[in-house]
Amino acid sequence: MSESSIHTAVPVPQDGGGRTITVLGATGQQGGSVSAALLASGWAVRAVVRDPAGVRARSLATAGAEIVRGDLADRGSLRAAFAGVHGVFSVQPSSGQVGAGLSHDDEIRYGTAVAEAAEHSGVNHLVYSSMIAAGPAPTGVRHFDVKSRIEDRVRRLGTASTIVRPATFMELLLTTATDLEKGVLTFLMRPDQAMQLIAVRDIGRVVAAVFDAPGRFANRTIEIAGDALTGDAIARHLALAVGRPITYRRMPQAVLEQDEVLARSVALVDDGRLAGRTDLAALRATFPFLLRFDQWLKGPGGTLLADALSSGAR
């Protein structure tokens, strides 16, 4: 398993705070996955949401989560949400997400506020979800580099913490697939170049395992992935799943020349930072539930694949 760093020595969390974890972003992809995995592992979940009456919040309540109103811009609401809990899962909306209305400074401020509120509230264990390319060397992509800034603040806490760095989401391959119905998949890597991937479901399961074993995972940074596939191999798996040929192509140079973030992302794949370098065999020995891409397509990815095909047809 690749553990890219060990944080400054902080006492390993004990059993204080009972069996409750506060989950930020609980109605989003990662927070929803973490909430489900924690509930399945016997933890109580306090889900922080902006709209307790929303459909996703009500669904969480039905599943057994405690729903509390909170706002990343309101430190008082964060401290209230963290009062008396054992741990906090921290994830923020990405400042690179189209339509998020979030600046890079906003994401840093929110991630820092969560970390500091957790320390102030006496939380035993903070788990922060970053991303695979984060680290001491700037990437040149602002919404990647803000996560490195938040990581730095998390490591300086007097609270035990774990940073998980997920690889590229398997879901992203299909949510950005606009020509799949035409038999073409386009993404960042070369056709013969391997890129590590993870199912969002497995991020939640890893986080639950981290909270379950603080003695093993506290004060560490862990890169996580479930598979490593070339563009051509991904296309072959998709072709088997849909029963017709799929061809893989890297994003055209003309597109990259018009989009600096995409061009820099491709460069980060080529230098390995966005492609991922974790030891998958060691990681799977620790987290045996990690899904390979073909398993994901037969399971949680099946509906997303059908949606990608139907939206392409429309």
Image (cartoon, rainbow, N blue to C red):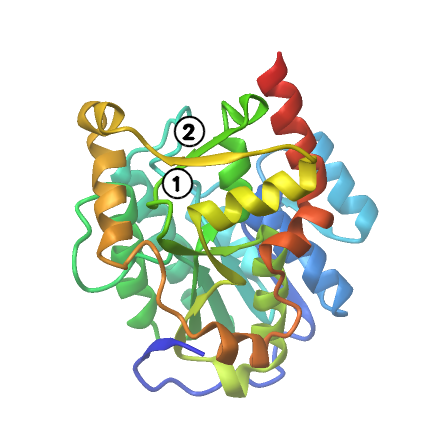
- Spot occupied by residue 135 in the image (x, y as percentages of width and height): 25, 63
The N terminus is located in which quarter?
bottom left
Query: According to the image, label 1 marks what residue?
Result: 94
Left or right: 137, with 157 as reference point: left
Above or below, comparing residue 10 to residue 182 in the picture? below
Q: Amino acid at mark 1?
A: Ser
Identify the residue shown where x is 62% and y is 15%: 313
- Spot occupied by residue 24 in the image (x, y as percentages of width and height): 54, 50
Q: Is residue 306 visible?
A: yes
Q: Secondary structure at mark 2?
A: loop
Q: Secondary structure at mark 1?
A: loop
- Spot occupied by residue 68 in the image (x, y as percentages of width and height): 65, 46
- Crowding around mark 1 (Cα neighbors within 10 Å: few <14, some 14 to 19, many 20+) is some
Above or below, comparing residue 130 to residue 3 in the picture? above
Residue furthest out toward the right: 62
Identify the residue shown where x is 48% and y is 34%: 247
Identify the residue shown where x is 44% and y is 43%: 72
Residue furthest out toward the front: 245
Name the disc covering residue 100, or none: 2
**Sooner in the amino-acid sequence: mark 1 or mark 2:** 1
Choose between 232 and 43: the one closer to the eye.
232
Identify the residue shown where x is 74% and y is 52%: 65
Q: Is residue 25 visible?
A: no
Choose between 235 and 90: the one closer to the eye.
235
Q: For the residues labelled 1 and 2, say whether their Cβ atoms are less than 8 Å apart.
A: yes
The C terminus is located in which quarter?
top right
Q: Amino acid at mark 2?
A: Ala
Rendering quarter of residue 69: top right
- Crowding around mark 2 (Cα neighbors within 10 Å: few <14, some 14 to 19, many 20+) is few
Q: CA distance from mark 1 to mark 2?
A: 7 Å
